[in-house]
Protein backbone atom coordinates (compact mmCIF):
# COMPACT_ATOMS: atom_id res chain seq x y z
CA UNK A 1 0.00 0.00 0.00
CA UNK A 2 2.79 2.41 0.93
CA UNK A 3 4.62 1.62 -2.31
CA UNK A 4 1.47 2.41 -4.31
CA UNK A 5 1.10 5.79 -2.61
CA UNK A 6 4.79 6.51 -3.17
CA UNK A 7 4.47 5.61 -6.86
CA UNK A 8 1.45 7.89 -7.16
CA UNK A 9 3.38 10.82 -5.68
CA UNK A 10 6.36 10.25 -7.97
CA UNK A 11 4.14 9.98 -11.04
CA UNK A 12 2.28 13.20 -10.23
CA UNK A 13 5.59 14.99 -9.67
CA UNK A 14 6.68 13.94 -13.16
CA UNK A 15 3.35 15.16 -14.58
CA UNK A 16 3.77 18.56 -12.91
CA UNK A 17 7.31 18.87 -14.30
CA UNK A 18 6.10 18.15 -17.86
CA UNK A 19 3.28 20.72 -17.58
CA UNK A 20 5.75 23.23 -16.14
CA UNK A 21 8.03 22.65 -19.14
CA UNK A 22 5.13 23.14 -21.56
CA UNK A 23 4.25 26.45 -19.92
CA UNK A 24 7.91 27.41 -20.09
CA UNK A 25 8.12 28.02 -16.33
CA UNK A 26 10.92 27.67 -13.85
CA UNK A 27 10.59 24.68 -11.56
CA UNK A 28 11.58 26.65 -8.44
CA UNK A 29 8.96 29.33 -9.07
CA UNK A 30 5.77 28.78 -7.03
CA UNK A 31 7.38 25.61 -5.68
CA UNK A 32 5.10 25.65 -2.62
CA UNK A 33 1.93 25.61 -4.76
CA UNK A 34 3.33 22.83 -6.94
CA UNK A 35 4.20 20.68 -3.92
CA UNK A 36 0.73 21.29 -2.48
CA UNK A 37 -0.90 20.12 -5.73
CA UNK A 38 1.25 16.95 -5.77
CA UNK A 39 0.39 16.21 -2.12
CA UNK A 40 -3.35 16.73 -2.72
CA UNK A 41 -3.28 14.44 -5.74
CA UNK A 42 -1.34 11.83 -3.76
CA UNK A 43 -3.90 11.94 -0.94
CA UNK A 44 -6.75 11.40 -3.42
CA UNK A 45 -4.88 8.47 -4.95
CA UNK A 46 -4.20 7.07 -1.48
CA UNK A 47 -7.95 7.02 -0.76
CA UNK A 48 -8.45 5.50 -4.21
CA UNK A 49 -6.14 2.59 -3.31
CA UNK A 50 -7.23 2.16 0.31
CA UNK A 51 -10.97 2.07 -0.39
CA UNK A 52 -10.72 0.44 -3.82
CA UNK A 53 -12.71 3.22 -5.46
CA UNK A 54 -13.89 3.03 -9.08
CA UNK A 55 -11.82 4.36 -11.94
CA UNK A 56 -14.00 7.47 -12.29
CA UNK A 57 -12.36 8.86 -9.13
CA UNK A 58 -9.12 9.12 -11.09
CA UNK A 59 -10.67 12.01 -13.01
CA UNK A 60 -10.71 14.00 -9.76
CA UNK A 61 -6.91 13.80 -9.64
CA UNK A 62 -6.58 15.48 -13.00
CA UNK A 63 -9.25 18.02 -12.13
CA UNK A 64 -7.06 19.06 -9.18
CA UNK A 65 -4.03 19.18 -11.45
CA UNK A 66 -5.84 21.30 -14.07
CA UNK A 67 -7.15 23.69 -11.41
CA UNK A 68 -3.68 24.00 -9.92
CA UNK A 69 -2.11 24.79 -13.27
CA UNK A 70 -4.78 27.39 -13.94
CA UNK A 71 -4.02 28.96 -10.55
CA UNK A 72 -0.24 29.00 -11.07
CA UNK A 73 0.08 29.98 -14.72
CA UNK A 74 -3.21 31.89 -15.26
CA UNK A 75 -3.47 30.31 -18.71
CA UNK A 76 -6.43 29.51 -20.90
CA UNK A 77 -8.45 26.69 -19.30
CA UNK A 78 -8.51 24.69 -22.54
CA UNK A 79 -4.72 24.99 -22.84
CA UNK A 80 -4.35 23.83 -19.20
CA UNK A 81 -6.53 20.78 -19.89
CA UNK A 82 -4.58 19.84 -23.02
CA UNK A 83 -1.19 20.32 -21.34
CA UNK A 84 -2.25 18.05 -18.46
CA UNK A 85 -3.47 15.39 -20.91
CA UNK A 86 -0.21 15.58 -22.88
CA UNK A 87 1.80 15.34 -19.65
CA UNK A 88 -0.22 12.28 -18.65
CA UNK A 89 0.46 10.67 -22.03
CA UNK A 90 4.20 11.46 -22.05
CA UNK A 91 4.79 10.19 -18.50
CA UNK A 92 2.67 7.09 -19.06
CA UNK A 93 4.55 6.34 -22.28
CA UNK A 94 7.88 6.63 -20.44
CA UNK A 95 6.66 4.28 -17.71
CA UNK A 96 5.53 1.77 -20.31
CA UNK A 97 8.94 1.84 -21.99
CA UNK A 98 10.55 1.02 -18.65
CA UNK A 99 8.00 -1.68 -17.77
CA UNK A 100 8.66 -3.65 -20.94
CA UNK A 101 12.32 -4.58 -20.28
CA UNK A 102 11.49 -5.21 -16.60
CA UNK A 103 8.76 -7.67 -17.56
CA UNK A 104 11.00 -9.23 -20.19
CA UNK A 105 14.01 -9.87 -17.95
CA UNK A 106 12.31 -10.54 -14.61
CA UNK A 107 9.13 -12.17 -15.94
CA UNK A 108 7.07 -10.03 -13.61
CA UNK A 109 3.70 -8.48 -14.27
CA UNK A 110 3.39 -4.71 -14.59
CA UNK A 111 1.34 -4.58 -11.41
CA UNK A 112 4.29 -5.74 -9.34
CA UNK A 113 5.38 -3.06 -6.84
CA UNK A 114 9.05 -3.30 -7.86
CA UNK A 115 8.11 -2.80 -11.51
CA UNK A 116 5.91 0.12 -10.54
CA UNK A 117 8.67 1.84 -8.59
CA UNK A 118 11.14 1.30 -11.43
CA UNK A 119 8.64 2.67 -13.95
CA UNK A 120 7.65 5.79 -11.98
CA UNK A 121 11.14 6.67 -10.71
CA UNK A 122 12.58 6.04 -14.17
CA UNK A 123 9.93 8.24 -15.75
CA UNK A 124 10.69 11.04 -13.27
CA UNK A 125 14.42 10.80 -14.07
CA UNK A 126 13.70 10.82 -17.80
CA UNK A 127 11.56 13.94 -17.43
CA UNK A 128 14.34 15.65 -15.46
CA UNK A 129 16.87 14.71 -18.13
CA UNK A 130 14.52 15.84 -20.91
CA UNK A 131 14.17 19.23 -19.23
CA UNK A 132 17.88 19.69 -18.64
CA UNK A 133 19.18 18.27 -21.93
CA UNK A 134 16.22 19.55 -23.98
CA UNK A 135 15.54 16.16 -25.50
CA UNK A 136 11.92 17.16 -26.06
CA UNK A 137 11.06 20.21 -28.13
CA UNK A 138 8.62 21.82 -25.69
CA UNK A 139 8.20 24.89 -27.90
CA UNK A 140 7.02 22.76 -30.79
CA UNK A 141 4.39 21.12 -28.59
CA UNK A 142 3.31 24.58 -27.38
CA UNK A 143 2.90 25.81 -30.95
CA UNK A 144 0.98 22.70 -31.94
CA UNK A 145 -1.46 22.98 -29.01
CA UNK A 146 -1.97 26.75 -29.37
CA UNK A 147 -2.67 26.43 -33.10
CA UNK A 148 -4.94 23.41 -32.77
CA UNK A 149 -6.37 23.74 -29.27
CA UNK A 150 -9.98 24.13 -30.43
CA UNK A 151 -9.78 21.02 -32.57
CA UNK A 152 -8.07 19.09 -29.76
CA UNK A 153 -10.79 20.19 -27.31
CA UNK A 154 -13.46 18.85 -29.67
CA UNK A 155 -11.55 15.58 -29.93
CA UNK A 156 -11.27 15.27 -26.15
CA UNK A 157 -14.99 16.00 -25.77
CA UNK A 158 -15.81 13.33 -28.34
CA UNK A 159 -13.52 10.84 -26.63
CA UNK A 160 -15.12 11.61 -23.27
CA UNK A 161 -18.60 11.08 -24.71
CA UNK A 162 -17.59 7.77 -26.28
CA UNK A 163 -16.00 6.72 -23.00
CA UNK A 164 -19.10 7.49 -20.92
CA UNK A 165 -21.32 5.71 -23.42
CA UNK A 166 -19.04 2.65 -23.35
CA UNK A 167 -18.97 2.67 -19.56
CA UNK A 168 -22.73 2.92 -19.16
CA UNK A 169 -23.83 0.64 -22.00
CA UNK A 170 -21.07 -1.93 -22.40
CA UNK A 171 -19.92 -1.96 -18.74
CA UNK A 172 -16.25 -1.91 -19.74
CA UNK A 173 -15.24 -1.06 -16.17
CA UNK A 174 -15.39 -4.74 -15.31
CA UNK A 175 -12.66 -5.59 -17.77
CA UNK A 176 -10.63 -2.36 -18.22
CA UNK A 177 -9.75 0.45 -15.81
CA UNK A 178 -11.24 3.71 -17.01
CA UNK A 179 -7.90 5.56 -17.05
CA UNK A 180 -6.38 2.86 -19.27
CA UNK A 181 -9.21 3.34 -21.70
CA UNK A 182 -8.68 7.11 -21.71
CA UNK A 183 -4.95 6.66 -22.21
CA UNK A 184 -5.44 4.35 -25.20
CA UNK A 185 -7.89 6.62 -27.02
CA UNK A 186 -6.09 9.87 -26.34
CA UNK A 187 -2.76 8.43 -27.45
CA UNK A 188 -4.33 7.62 -30.81
CA UNK A 189 -6.18 10.92 -31.38
CA UNK A 190 -3.56 13.34 -29.97
CA UNK A 191 -0.06 11.91 -30.09
CA UNK A 192 -0.31 10.53 -33.63
CA UNK A 193 -1.37 13.87 -35.21
CA UNK A 194 1.26 15.62 -33.08
CA UNK A 195 4.01 13.30 -34.33
CA UNK A 196 2.79 13.85 -37.89
CA UNK A 197 3.12 17.60 -37.37
CA UNK A 198 6.61 17.16 -35.90
CA UNK A 199 7.74 15.13 -38.92
CA UNK A 200 6.29 17.75 -41.27
CA UNK A 201 8.14 20.52 -39.43
CA UNK A 202 11.42 18.58 -39.59
CA UNK A 203 11.02 18.06 -43.35
CA UNK A 204 10.34 21.79 -43.85
CA UNK A 205 13.37 22.63 -41.71
CA UNK A 206 15.62 20.42 -43.83
CA UNK A 207 14.26 22.00 -47.01
CA UNK A 208 14.90 25.48 -45.67
CA UNK A 209 18.44 24.54 -44.62
CA UNK A 210 19.27 23.90 -48.29
CA UNK A 211 18.87 27.62 -48.91
CA UNK A 212 20.75 28.82 -45.83
CA UNK A 213 23.96 29.71 -47.69
CA UNK A 214 22.17 31.32 -50.67
CA UNK A 215 20.13 33.41 -48.26
CA UNK A 216 23.28 34.59 -46.48
CA UNK A 217 24.71 35.54 -49.89
CA UNK A 218 21.49 37.37 -50.69
CA UNK A 219 21.71 39.40 -47.48
CA UNK A 220 25.33 40.27 -48.24
CA UNK A 221 24.41 41.37 -51.76
CA UNK A 222 21.49 43.49 -50.48
CA UNK A 223 23.82 45.24 -48.06
CA UNK A 224 26.29 45.89 -50.89
CA UNK A 225 23.51 47.30 -53.05
CA UNK A 226 22.37 49.53 -50.20
CA UNK A 227 25.91 50.81 -49.76
CA UNK A 228 26.17 51.53 -53.51
CA UNK A 229 22.77 53.21 -53.49
CA UNK A 230 23.83 55.51 -50.63
CA UNK A 231 27.03 56.38 -52.51
CA UNK A 232 25.06 57.23 -55.66
CA UNK A 233 22.69 59.43 -53.68
CA UNK A 234 25.62 61.34 -52.19
CA UNK A 235 27.14 61.77 -55.66
CA UNK A 236 23.84 63.06 -57.07
CA UNK A 237 23.49 65.44 -54.14
CA UNK A 238 26.99 66.75 -54.86
CA UNK A 239 26.14 67.24 -58.55
CA UNK A 240 23.04 69.25 -57.62
CA UNK A 241 25.08 71.54 -55.37
CA UNK A 242 27.87 71.95 -57.92
CA UNK A 243 25.85 72.72 -61.05
CA UNK A 244 24.88 76.38 -61.43
CA UNK A 245 22.41 76.07 -64.31
CA UNK A 246 19.57 73.73 -65.17
CA UNK A 247 21.16 72.63 -68.45
CA UNK A 248 24.41 71.81 -66.68
CA UNK A 249 22.51 69.78 -64.06
CA UNK A 250 20.60 67.75 -66.68
CA UNK A 251 23.71 67.07 -68.76
CA UNK A 252 25.81 66.04 -65.75
CA UNK A 253 23.11 63.78 -64.32
CA UNK A 254 22.51 62.08 -67.68
CA UNK A 255 26.24 61.46 -68.05
CA UNK A 256 26.50 60.09 -64.51
CA UNK A 257 23.49 57.77 -64.94
CA UNK A 258 24.85 56.42 -68.23
CA UNK A 259 28.16 55.67 -66.48
CA UNK A 260 26.33 53.81 -63.73
CA UNK A 261 24.52 51.66 -66.27
CA UNK A 262 27.76 50.85 -68.09
CA UNK A 263 29.78 50.13 -64.94
CA UNK A 264 27.16 48.30 -62.90
CA UNK A 265 26.42 44.98 -64.57
CA UNK A 266 23.47 44.56 -62.21
CA UNK A 267 21.74 47.89 -62.82
CA UNK A 268 18.66 46.14 -64.25
CA UNK A 269 18.10 44.41 -60.90
CA UNK A 270 16.96 47.74 -59.48
CA UNK A 271 13.67 47.10 -61.30
CA UNK A 272 13.05 43.90 -59.32
CA UNK A 273 11.00 44.87 -56.26
CA UNK A 274 11.51 41.62 -54.35
CA UNK A 275 14.79 42.14 -52.43
CA UNK A 276 15.39 38.42 -51.94
CA UNK A 277 15.08 37.59 -55.63
CA UNK A 278 17.06 40.69 -56.64
CA UNK A 279 19.78 39.89 -54.11
CA UNK A 280 19.98 36.25 -55.19
CA UNK A 281 20.34 37.15 -58.89
CA UNK A 282 22.94 39.74 -57.89
CA UNK A 283 24.96 37.06 -56.11
CA UNK A 284 24.87 34.80 -59.17
CA UNK A 285 25.81 37.66 -61.50
CA UNK A 286 28.73 38.56 -59.23
CA UNK A 287 29.87 34.94 -59.30
CA UNK A 288 29.85 34.96 -63.11
CA UNK A 289 31.76 38.26 -63.33
CA UNK A 290 34.36 37.05 -60.81
CA UNK A 291 34.99 34.05 -63.06
CA UNK A 292 35.60 36.28 -66.06
CA UNK A 293 32.21 35.62 -67.67
CA UNK A 294 30.31 38.47 -69.31
CA UNK A 295 26.62 38.29 -68.45
CA UNK A 296 24.06 40.33 -70.35
CA UNK A 297 20.51 40.47 -69.02
CA UNK A 298 17.14 41.86 -69.90
CA UNK A 299 14.88 41.98 -66.86
CA UNK A 300 11.52 43.67 -67.25
CA UNK A 301 9.66 41.96 -64.39
CA UNK A 302 9.25 44.02 -61.23
CA UNK A 303 7.65 41.35 -59.06
CA UNK A 304 6.94 37.65 -59.54
CA UNK A 305 3.56 36.47 -58.28
CA UNK A 306 3.25 32.71 -58.71
CA UNK A 307 2.19 29.58 -56.86
CA UNK A 308 5.82 28.39 -56.64
CA UNK A 309 7.35 29.15 -53.19
CA UNK A 310 10.14 31.71 -53.36
CA UNK A 311 12.72 29.22 -52.03
CA UNK A 312 11.94 26.73 -54.82
CA UNK A 313 11.84 29.49 -57.43
CA UNK A 314 15.29 30.66 -56.36
CA UNK A 315 16.51 27.05 -56.43
CA UNK A 316 15.21 26.68 -59.99
CA UNK A 317 16.84 29.88 -61.24
CA UNK A 318 20.03 28.95 -59.40
CA UNK A 319 20.24 25.52 -61.05
CA UNK A 320 19.90 27.03 -64.54
CA UNK A 321 22.45 29.80 -63.88
CA UNK A 322 24.93 27.37 -62.25
CA UNK A 323 24.69 25.04 -65.24
CA UNK A 324 25.38 27.92 -67.62
CA UNK A 325 28.35 29.20 -65.59
CA UNK A 326 29.88 25.71 -65.36
CA UNK A 327 29.48 25.07 -69.08
CA UNK A 328 30.92 28.46 -70.09
CA UNK A 329 33.92 28.02 -67.78
CA UNK A 330 34.90 24.89 -69.68
CA UNK A 331 34.18 26.48 -73.07
CA UNK A 332 37.30 27.96 -74.71
CA UNK A 333 35.38 29.91 -77.41
CA UNK A 334 33.41 32.64 -75.66
CA UNK A 335 32.74 33.34 -72.00
CA UNK A 336 29.29 34.88 -72.21
CA UNK A 337 25.84 34.22 -70.75
CA UNK A 338 22.59 35.80 -71.87
CA UNK A 339 19.65 35.97 -69.48
CA UNK A 340 16.15 37.38 -69.73
CA UNK A 341 13.16 37.54 -67.41
CA UNK A 342 9.91 39.01 -68.64
CA UNK A 343 6.14 38.56 -68.74
CA UNK A 344 4.34 37.06 -71.69
CA UNK A 345 0.57 37.08 -71.31
CA UNK A 346 -0.35 35.07 -68.20
CA UNK A 347 3.15 33.61 -67.92
CA UNK A 348 6.56 34.60 -66.64
CA UNK A 349 9.37 33.50 -68.93
CA UNK A 350 12.91 32.97 -67.68
CA UNK A 351 15.48 32.21 -70.37
CA UNK A 352 19.21 31.62 -70.09
CA UNK A 353 21.56 30.72 -72.93
CA UNK A 354 25.27 30.05 -73.26
CA UNK A 355 27.81 28.72 -75.76
CA UNK A 356 28.05 24.93 -75.81
CA UNK A 357 30.22 22.33 -77.44
CA UNK A 358 28.85 20.71 -80.57
CA UNK A 359 25.79 18.82 -79.38
CA UNK A 360 22.81 17.40 -81.25
CA UNK A 361 19.20 17.64 -80.09
CA UNK A 362 19.02 13.92 -79.25
CA UNK A 363 21.61 14.47 -76.53
CA UNK A 364 19.96 17.70 -75.33
CA UNK A 365 16.67 15.87 -74.86
CA UNK A 366 18.41 13.64 -72.30
CA UNK A 367 19.73 16.57 -70.22
CA UNK A 368 16.79 16.58 -67.71
CA UNK A 369 17.05 12.84 -67.08
CA UNK A 370 18.14 11.98 -63.55
CA UNK A 371 21.86 11.22 -63.40
CA UNK A 372 22.56 12.16 -67.03
CA UNK A 373 25.68 14.33 -67.42
CA UNK A 374 28.22 15.07 -70.12
CA UNK A 375 30.84 16.22 -67.59
CA UNK A 376 33.42 14.34 -65.58
CA UNK A 377 32.27 12.56 -62.42
CA UNK A 378 28.90 12.13 -64.06
CA UNK A 379 27.75 9.79 -61.31
CA UNK A 380 27.81 12.77 -58.92
CA UNK A 381 25.99 15.08 -61.33
CA UNK A 382 22.92 15.17 -63.53
CA UNK A 383 20.49 16.55 -60.93
CA UNK A 384 20.29 20.26 -61.85
CA UNK A 385 17.95 20.11 -64.85
CA UNK A 386 16.23 17.06 -63.37
CA UNK A 387 15.26 19.14 -60.31
CA UNK A 388 14.14 22.01 -62.55
CA UNK A 389 11.90 19.68 -64.57
CA UNK A 390 10.55 18.09 -61.38
CA UNK A 391 9.65 21.53 -59.99
CA UNK A 392 7.98 22.58 -63.25
CA UNK A 393 5.93 19.37 -63.37
CA UNK A 394 4.85 19.80 -59.76
CA UNK A 395 3.72 23.42 -60.16
CA UNK A 396 2.33 23.10 -63.71
CA UNK A 397 5.16 25.05 -65.31
CA UNK A 398 6.94 24.33 -68.59
CA UNK A 399 10.59 23.66 -69.47
CA UNK A 400 11.99 24.01 -72.98
CA UNK A 401 15.52 23.12 -74.14
CA UNK A 402 16.89 24.20 -77.48
CA UNK A 403 20.07 24.59 -79.54
CA UNK A 404 20.77 27.36 -82.04
CA UNK A 405 23.73 28.93 -83.86
CA UNK A 406 25.21 32.40 -83.31
CA UNK A 407 28.13 33.50 -85.50
CA UNK A 408 28.95 29.87 -86.36
CA UNK A 409 29.01 28.91 -82.66
CA UNK A 410 26.56 26.53 -81.02
CA UNK A 411 24.45 27.94 -78.19
CA UNK A 412 22.25 26.12 -75.69
CA UNK A 413 19.08 27.75 -74.34
CA UNK A 414 16.97 26.70 -71.34
CA UNK A 415 13.60 28.38 -70.99
CA UNK A 416 10.99 27.97 -68.28
CA UNK A 417 7.46 29.35 -68.26
CA UNK A 418 5.68 29.90 -64.96
CA UNK A 419 1.98 30.65 -64.61
CA UNK A 420 1.30 34.13 -63.23
CA UNK A 421 -1.26 34.41 -60.44
CA UNK A 422 -3.92 36.98 -61.18
Image (cartoon, rainbow, N blue to C red):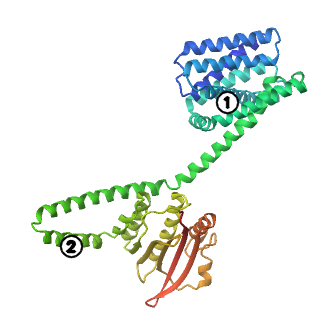
232 and 149: which one is in front? 149
137 and 274: which one is in front? 274
Mark 1 near mark 2, Cβ–Cβ under 8 Å? Answer: no
> Which quarter of the picture shows residue 286?
bottom left
Residue 68: % across, % down: 61, 17
Q: Quadrant of the N terminus?
A: top right
Compare marks 1 and 2 and give the one earlier in the sequence: 1
Q: Is residue 117 left or right of residue 372?
A: right
Residue 146: % across, % down: 59, 35
Residue 28: % across, % down: 52, 18
> Which quarter of the picture shows residue 82?
top right
Closest to the camera, between mark 1 and mark 2, is 2
> Which quarter of the picture shows residue 369?
bottom right
Secondary structure state at the residue bearing disc 2: helix
- Residue appearing at x 54%, y 71% in the figure: 417
Figure check: 296 above or below 25: below
Figure check: 392 above or below 337: above
Figure check: 211 above or below 321: above
- Residue appearing at x 62%, y 83% in the figure: 362
Q: CA distance from mark 1 to mark 2?
A: 70 Å
Q: Which residue is mark 1?
A: 86
Q: Which residue is mark 2?
A: 255
Q: Is residue 286 left or right of residue 199?
A: left
Amino acid sequence: MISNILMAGIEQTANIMVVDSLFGGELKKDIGKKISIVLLETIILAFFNIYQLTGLWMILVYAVMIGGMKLIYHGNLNICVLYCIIAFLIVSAMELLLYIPFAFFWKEMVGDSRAGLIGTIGALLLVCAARKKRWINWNMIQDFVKCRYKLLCYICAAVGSIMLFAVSYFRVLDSMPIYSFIFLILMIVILFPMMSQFIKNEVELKERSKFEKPMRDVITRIRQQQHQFDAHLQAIYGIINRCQTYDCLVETLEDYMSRIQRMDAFYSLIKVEDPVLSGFLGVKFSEAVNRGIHISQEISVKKICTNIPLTELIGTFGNLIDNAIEEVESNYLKKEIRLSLHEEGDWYEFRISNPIRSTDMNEIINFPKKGFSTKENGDMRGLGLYNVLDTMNHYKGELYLNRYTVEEADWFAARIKIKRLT
